[in-house]
Amino acid sequence: MADVLVVGAGPVGLALAADLRVRGVDVAIVERRTGSDAGTRAIGIHSPSLAHLEASGATDALLARAVRIGRGEARADGRRLATIRFDRLRARHPFVAALPQSDTVDVLTQLAPAVSRGVRVTAVREDGAGVRVRAVGPRGEVDLRAAIVVVASGWAGRELVYRPGAVHTHHYPDRYAMVDVAAPGDATALVHLERGGVVESFPLPGGRRRLVAWAGKADVPDAAEFLRAALADRVGLDVDTSTASTFRVRRAVAPALRRGRVIVVGDAAHEVSPIGGQGMNLGLLDALTLSPLLAEWVRGTEPRRLAAWEQGRLASARHAARLAFLNTMLGRGASAPGHATRSVALRTVLRGPGAAAFTRAYAMDFDAAARGG
């Protein structure tokens, strides 16, 4: 019987398993998918996450592959509204590390125990001093046991812990189009708040950039054509959008993160809009602040700090959800008067005393984990 069984081998589950491993905990990890996810979804790792990833040795390996974003600019109508200076944060890593999610997964996979793939968990049940796990593997049904189970398998993993309807999910009407392309630019993140809707441009390694554009509130029949036209019209950019895709956003925060010896982290517990880049980092901080508590638990009694951890992580999730909602609202298309008002308001806030708080919020410096909590 493993000390800890982690369900899910995405960035959050792998980060937890890697951290537990260096703490001497016997940890196993299972994943329903048979192969690694080659997607490039979440690309930014914020300063608090980088600090907590140091224990497993992941930080240096990630930074060796990443672009370091030390500043961002908010623009409108071809003019700079304000500059956000991550490089002025009082942090060990005063920047955002940008790299494809597949690279993040690759680094963490090398540091975590071997993943048992093709194993789909169907039920978890606390049983005395441990947890019984039922799963279906390549050779049929299997029963697993662990002292503690951590569900880190994304929104689909909620059904293992929560009753139907227990986690209220709000579906936003907004659509976005996205593409990763070779594009000119330095290591500055750009957010263009245009009348037709936001265009975000984030640097990636290898001279590439992630481009995201607000696509309205109706289905987009041709993502490539929409994004090509939106980029040309809003920011005068002509790039190959043939691999463009669309996505929608949801918001959900679970009422609790644990049920006895079963604990939930990452998207299984909370979802926020990817606009703002905090979703994966929320999950990483869930996992990496939980790890020392689990190491203490498997060697003795349940830590008293576990309840405080749960409340702190739920508070961080709610804060991130509110910030993501603000990002969504600011990024929508606007009338000419509304666009002008938005530009003036942002210029005033971001060039005044509120700039520092704004920067800290986007860098997740208000998260309890950034304060060692």
Image (cartoon, helix red, strand yellow):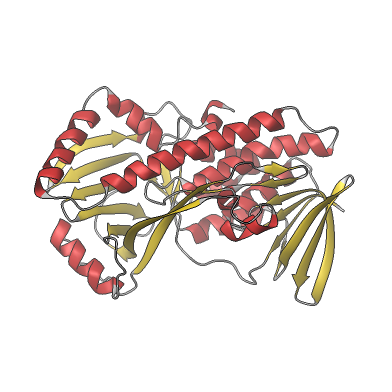
Residue at the image position 9 percent from the left and 48 percent from the top? 336
Q: Position of residue 354 (x, y in %)?
A: 29, 25
Residue 163 falls left or right of residue 75: right
Q: Position of residue 324 (x, y in %)?
A: 39, 44
Residue at the image position 48 percent from the left and 65 percent from the top? 39
Dividing the image into 4 quarters, which one contains the C terminus? top right
Visible residue check, residue 293: yes
Residue at the image position 63 percent from the left and 43 percent from the top? 287
Residue at the image position 70 percent from the left and 28 percent from the top? 305
Farthest front residue in view = 165
Front-lying residue, 60 or 355: 355
Q: Position of residue 112 (x, y in %)?
A: 68, 53
Farthest top residue in view = 353
Q: Position of residue 178 (x, y in %)?
A: 33, 63
Q: Is residue 346 above or below residue 254?
A: above
Front-lying residue, 70 or 4: 4
Farthest right residue in view = 128
Q: Is residue 225 above or below residue 30?
A: below
Visible residue check, residue 187: no
Residue 345 falls left or right of residue 94: left
Q: Which quadrant of the figure has residue 188?
A: top left
Front-lying residue, 110 or 78: 78
Q: Which quadrant of the figure has residue 73?
A: top left
